[in-house]
């Protein structure tokens, strides 16, 4: 009897976890997800090191270069460094989650960074012209025990093809795109003006027809 109750509890917990994960993936009606990407601006200044991305629940690992990178929106990831002379791909190519976790947690050659990265910028209204965000990272220093990275700036992209840069300030608080606020105000005014213009046009047509008939 006890074993059946225990099994039932486990099944309920698994179902609850799956349902909560599914809901976390669902976007509210009228909202859209803003893709968040990252780029390390000065990674080529450190050719002695291999830089890796590892997160939970993903990615297992990714070797970084000067290109932009992104990952699953519900993940939290960190950047690690390993001296190129000490880096062994075989330990990561086994496709074994336990081995990979152990590599990043316990391998003395792995240098941990001070920064945690989020997988999503968040959601905005569907009619918001914000289309994407790119956070530019900069390696401040790296040695045998520490990897210091800071957020330099964020580049917002919009559906009209324009971009806007905002620098990060103390505290790593993500800046807000001011252009979006201006666009929202313009859109709001447009929704007010358009019905008025339509009403004026209808009145003018009616007056013209009355004048013609008289």
Image (cartoon, grey):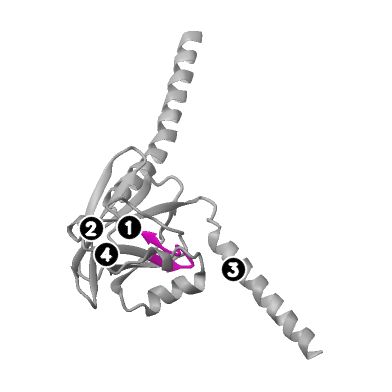
> Going 50% across and 74% down the picture, which residue do you hit?
98
Q: Earlier in the sequence, mark 4 or mark 1?
A: 1
Tell me the element at label 2: helix
Q: Are marks 3 and 4 in contact (CB under 8 Å)?
A: no
Q: Are marks 2 and 1 in contact (CB under 8 Å)?
A: yes
Tell me the element at label 4: loop
Residue 64 numbered mark, or none: 1
> Going 27% across and 60% down the picture, which residue do you hit?
175
Question: Magenta stretch containing residue 31, yes or no?
Answer: no
Left or right: where does residue 81 sit relative to residue 74? left
**Within 10 Å of the Cα at label 3, are there few (<14), some (14-19), or many (20+) other Cα atoms?**
few
Left or right: where does residue 155 sit relative to residue 123? left
Q: Position of residue 69 (x, y in %)?
A: 36, 54
Q: How many marks?
A: 4
Q: Could you tell me how far apart the alpha carbons at marks 2 and 4 are, in whole angstroms?
A: 13 Å
Residue 20 numbered mark, or none: 3
Q: Measured along the vertical axis of the image, is residue 141 above or below residue 156?
A: below
Where is mark 4, residue-wise?
84
Where is mark 2, residue-wise?
43
Q: Could you tell me how far apart the alpha carbons at marks 1 and 3 are, in whole angstroms?
A: 31 Å
């Amino acid at each position: 009897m006890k074993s059946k109750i225990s099994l039932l509890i486990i099944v309920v917990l698994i179902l609850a976890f799956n349902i909560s994960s599914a809901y976390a993936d669902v976007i509210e009606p009228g909202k859209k997800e803003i893709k968040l990407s990252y780029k390390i601006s000065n990674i080529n200044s450190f050719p002695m090191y291999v830089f890796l991305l590892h997160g939970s629940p993903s990615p297992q690992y990714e070797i970084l270069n000067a290109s932009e990178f992104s990952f699953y929106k519900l993940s939290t990831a960190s950047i690690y460094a390993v001296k190129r002379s000490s880096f062994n791909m075989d330990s990561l190519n086994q496709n074994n989650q336990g081995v990979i976790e152990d590599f990043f947690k316990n391998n003395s050659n792995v240098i941990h960074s001070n920064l945690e990265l989020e997988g999503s910028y968040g959601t905005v209204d569907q009619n918001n012209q914000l289309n994407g965000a790119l956070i530019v990272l900069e390696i401040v220093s790296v040695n045998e025990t520490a990897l210091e990275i800071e957020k330099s700036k964020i580049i917002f992209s919009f559906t009209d093809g324009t971009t806007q840069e905002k620098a990060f300030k103390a505290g790593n608080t993500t800046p807000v795109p001011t252009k979006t606020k201006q666009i929202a105000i313009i859109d709001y005014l447009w929704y007010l003006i358009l019905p008025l213009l339509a009403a004026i046009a209808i009145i003018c047509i009616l007056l013209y027809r009355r004048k013609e008939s008289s």
